[in-house]
Amino acid sequence: MLKVFKVVGDSMLPTLKPNDLVITSSFKKMNKRDIVVLNTNIYGNIVKRISIIDGTKINIESDNKKTYSATCQRSYFVSSIVGKVIFKISARNIFLRLLIN
């Protein structure tokens, strides 16, 4: 199933910018370095990159090393992954601007 999410914040710069849209798919196999959307109890849905896969748990990281993200300081269950990012639509895209304004 495909799902669409809006990027909030700058923790994934330069790969993803604020207001970009990402389209995810619920792939069964995730790999290290994949960008995923996770559902967390504290922060809701977040977009991060997988840094470590260890059985049923993963660690995540931000692409923007100039920012601190508390969400990256713990492990998550693989089952918390909503989907793997397979496509992005830039916030600079005129079509996207019409949708979010």
Image (cartoon, rainbow, N blue to C red):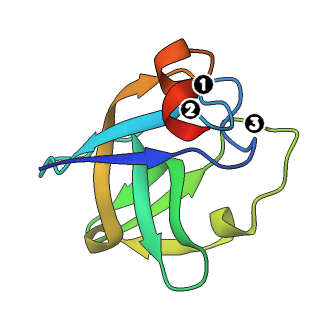
The residue pinned by badge 3 equals: 64
Q: Is residue 59 above or below residue 86?
A: below
Residue 85 at what x, y percent from top left?
Answer: 35, 38
In the image, which disc is placed on residue 20? 2
Label 2 crowd bin: few (<14), some (14–19), many (20+), radius 10 Å: some
Callout 2 touching callout 1 (CB < 8 Å): yes
Residue 94 at what x, y percent from top left?
Answer: 55, 14
Amino acid of disc 1 = Ala
Q: Earlier in the sequence, mark 1 or mark 3?
A: 3
Viewer-nearest of labels 1 and 3? 1
Identify which residue, 42 or 19, lies in the foreground: 19
Callout 1 touching callout 3 (CB < 8 Å): no
The residue pinned by badge 1 equals: 91
Q: Residue at point 50% right, 26% down?
A: 96
Q: Residue at point 42% right, 26% down?
A: 88
In the image, which disc is placed on residue 12? none
**Cα–Cα gap, marks 1 and 3:** 18 Å
Q: Is residue 45 above or below residue 30?
A: below
Q: Earlier in the sequence, mark 2 or mark 1?
A: 2
Identify which residue, 96 or 38, lies in the foreground: 96
Q: Secondary structure at mark 3?
A: loop
Residue 43 at what x, y percent from top left?
Answer: 60, 75
**Cα–Cα gap, marks 3 and 2:** 15 Å
